[in-house]
Image (spheres, helix red, strand yellow):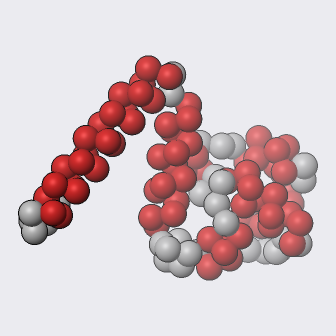
Amino acid sequence: MREERNITRRDFAERLQISYFTLSKYETSEREPDFSTLVRIADALHVSTDFILKGHEAARGQNVEDQTLILMRYRALPPDAQARIRNQLAFEYQQLQAQTKNGASYA
């Protein structure tokens, strides 16, 4: 997950206030983090501890990670780009509501 977010191991270790070596051991499953470190990892990656513990297939699967990544990217955008996305989302939702009301499926 760290690599998918383009965070270096060194930067992530600093963010977690642990050594590069310790993080390396966690990532290669040579060592397991204690509970407080696990919580810091989850917070830093904007995921739940369940998601970390159970893997990509659990905790509502890949969808949780996708939504987190979308939200992180949205928050990084300037206000005018966020407004365009909100408008598009509102339009798509209205389309869904209209199609659902008419008995059609949304594709």
Query: In x, y percent, where is residue 15?
Result: 82, 44
What residue lies at 62% left-to-right and 79% top-to-bottom? 54
What residue lies at 56% left-to-right and 75% top-to-bottom? 59
Outermost residue toward the front?
A: 101
Residue 96 lies, with reference to residue 86, above or below; the image says: below
Q: Is residue 28 left or right of residue 78?
A: right
What residue lies at 52% left-to-right and 59% top-to-bottom? 65
Q: Quarter holding the C terminus?
A: bottom left
Q: Quadrant of residue 30?
A: bottom right
Q: Quarter holding the N terminus?
A: bottom right
What residue lies at 76% left-to-right and 47% top-to-bottom? 12
Residue 47 lies, with reference to residue 58, above or below; the image says: above
Looking at this view, is 5 or 49 the one in front? 49
Query: In x, y percent, where is residue 93?
Result: 28, 50
Looking at this view, is 37 or 24 the one in front? 37
Q: Quadrant of residue 76?
A: top right
Looking at this view, is 19 or 5 the one in front? 5
Q: Is residue 49 left or right of residue 15?
A: left
